[in-house]
Amino acid sequence: MIAPAAHIRTLIVIPARYGSTRFPGKPLAEIGGKSMLRHTAETADVVARAAPGRAYVVATDDDRIRDHCEAHDLPVVMTDPDCPSGSDRAMAACHMVAPTAEIIVNLQGDAPFTPPDYIEHCLANLADDPEADMATPVVPLDWAALDQLRADKRTTPFSGTTAIIDGATGRARWFSKTIIPAIRKEEIWRQHEELSPVLRHVGLYAYRRAALEQFMALAESPYERTEGLEQLRALEAGMIISCARVDPAPVSLSGIDTPEDLARAEALLAGMSH
């Protein structure tokens, strides 16, 4: 059940589209006998129950996803099919469910292994950095994880995003579908550093309400269009993104964007059960 609108200060929205060029029906694809959407909703439910004034809702434009939610008692609202992005869908859901919410979390419906503490860290970053417009998690990669990301990109080059952040402030400088930074004399780094300098971005965002409204009013930016990353629109407009450093998830995957990614997720989950 969704709490009364006036009591919701933080709303977690799970945008879930059925249509996908690379992977139609992706949120309903099953991992370990359960849909990605249900896995993701379980994360949102844990965070929503952890403190007063929180709630979550699935935002979709498809009857099949709505029916799936209703069959499993997941709160759901129908939004305009023409919403251009997950952030637009999150804002639309907020207007419907919690029009006075102060913080809006965009947790994509294809993020089944996101630990609840990733969301908590983002909320804490917004509390600790009053100037930040939004917060998002990044995972420092050890060398094995970096090697795996490189291997994954050989088959699905646009799966997985990396980030550059300011070491002093923790704020984002850039994001890319390319693995950044390039590592000169990597063999020396590997001898002396446990972690690589690469940070993998996790695609969830906690926005201040005014910042999300500002973001939605912006036109698509040049680098956003080039890389296919909407957070670059915010950076190009001078918005401040606070990056929360988080530990790798028990099942660590850059993203599930293709059937090949789904197969990797199934294999990782199966490995955990043995």
Image: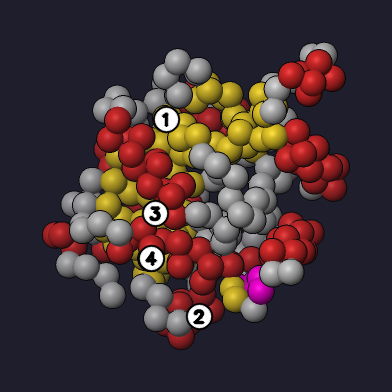
Q: Nearer the viewer, mark 1 or mark 2?
A: 1
Q: Which residues are magenta?
A: 28-32
Q: Is residue 131 visible?
A: yes
Can you give x and y, in whole percent of width and height, for residue 120 in the image? 38, 47
Marks 4/2: CA–CA distance: 17 Å
Q: Quadrant of residue 157?
A: top right
**Is 210 on the left or on the right of 113, as rendered?**
left
Marks 2/3: CA–CA distance: 19 Å
- The image quadrant where one finds the N terminus is bottom left
Q: Earlier in the sequence, mark 1 or mark 2?
A: 2
The residue where tag 4 is placed is 45
Marks 3/4: CA–CA distance: 16 Å
The number of numbered badges drawn on the structure is: 4
The residue that appears at 66% across and 24% down in the rendered structure is 197
**Is 101 on the left or on the right of 138, as rendered?**
left
**Image height of 127 relative to 64, above or below:** above
